[in-house]
Image: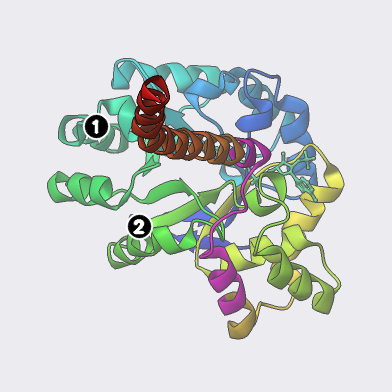
Amino acid sequence: MPFGSVKLNDGNELPAIGFGTGTALRDKDAAPYIAQAIETGFSHIDTAQIYNNEESVGVAIRESALPRSDLYITTKYGYGPIQETVRTSLGKLGLKQLDLYLIHHPRNVGFEFERSWKEFEKIKEDGLSRSIGVSNFNLEQLQSLVKTATIIPAVNQIAFHPYNYAENKGLLEYAAKHRIVIEAYSSLTPITKFPGGAVDGPINAAAKRRGVAPTQVILAWVKAKGVVIVTTSSSKQHLEQYLAVADIPPLTKEEIAAIDEAGAKGPPRTASQKAGRAASLALALAVSIAITVGIHTSFQSPFQVRNLHLIRFI
Ligand SMILES: NC(=O)c1ccc[n+]([C@@H]2O[C@H](COP(=O)([O-])OP(=O)(O)OC[C@H]3O[C@@H](n4cnc5c(N)ncnc54)[C@H](OP(=O)(O)O)[C@@H]3O)[C@@H](O)[C@H]2O)c1
């Protein structure tokens, strides 16, 4: 069974899993990796101006020889005059129209949303992108953009995983109210960045029960939250595992609750955080020793002085 797609608030469809060309493929020739992803069954490709690989995404699109309608292409605005930048991205990708164009980060538009979003609305009206959206917007930033928008963003792409679910609940609720689809990136954080944390237990247990990989359980958890997955891999086996998530038995309410609860405890400390904590503990200890010695010395010195005084007079 394929992953399927979700309906956006502008009526367009977004494939519910995408292959990303950021992180590991930044500044690289992404074409062979995209070719592998397309061959494995991905149709949704995610890139960005700042990944500096839009040309190679264009090569992969052409080499796939697929009809344009069989692929879903997202790119993101990073810097420069907006109308000029979207045309440059289209040129690099070799496309007349994007499927989705995102503001990569609120700082890319100087946290000034009204004017920049008008430019994005013009991009949709001019047919340069079928849908428009944002990325890395927190609740307040999304609310502020929506307040003056004529076209509500179709998507907000954010870092989303069990360790930051609790802090994003309000954002998810607000997005659902406005039918803004949340796309998740870095969902595999519990494995790639924070192994050994509280969520490992419930994730591994759910994986064992189904005879699947822990990465598949994490992606099944993202899917269960109604969130679209943007992931990546250099390995065909991992790509196959990601797509097979559509076929594994859905997580139960209890399994989801156990992952949520463990995730709310936060990620484990990294080695550098542990070293930092050890250093601050050592510093606190040194300061308290110094203070104690200081107090002790200040209590002692009058005695010593007095004693010396006595000694002198004996
Ligand atoms: N909007 C934004 O600001 C933003 C920010 C970051 C990312 N993104 C987008 O999201 C995409 C995905 O981001 P991400 O890389 O952070 O996503 P992710 O899905 O959390 O991680 C993907 C990584 O997990 C590794 N992986 C897969 N299975 C594994 C396993 N069993 N054990 C250990 N590692 C495993 C893969 O490495 P292998 O190659 O070894 O499989 C791959 O590098 C990016 O490419 C980009 O398009 C957007």
Q: How many marks?
A: 2
Relative vertical location of residue 306 with respect to residue 11 in this rendering, above or below: above
Question: Which mark identifies residue 173?
Answer: none
Residue range in magenta is 257-275
Compared with residue 87, is residue 98 higher up or lower down, i.e. above or below? Answer: below
How would you rate the neighbour count of disc 1 (Cα within 10 Å): few for under 14, some for 14-19, many for 20 or more? some
Q: Position of residue 117 (x, y in %)?
A: 23, 36
* Secondary-structure class at tag 1: loop
Q: Nearer the viewer, residue 210 or 88?
A: 210
Q: Nearer the viewer, residue 314 or 40?
A: 314
Rendering coords of residue 76 (x, y %): 44, 31
Q: Residue at the spot x=56%, y=61% of the render?
A: 162
User: Badge 2 is on which residue?
Assistant: 180
Q: In terms of image quadrants, where is residue 114?
A: top left
The prevailing secondary structure element of the residues shown in magenta is helix
Percent position of residue 170, x then y: 33, 63
**Image check: 162 left or right of 122?**
right
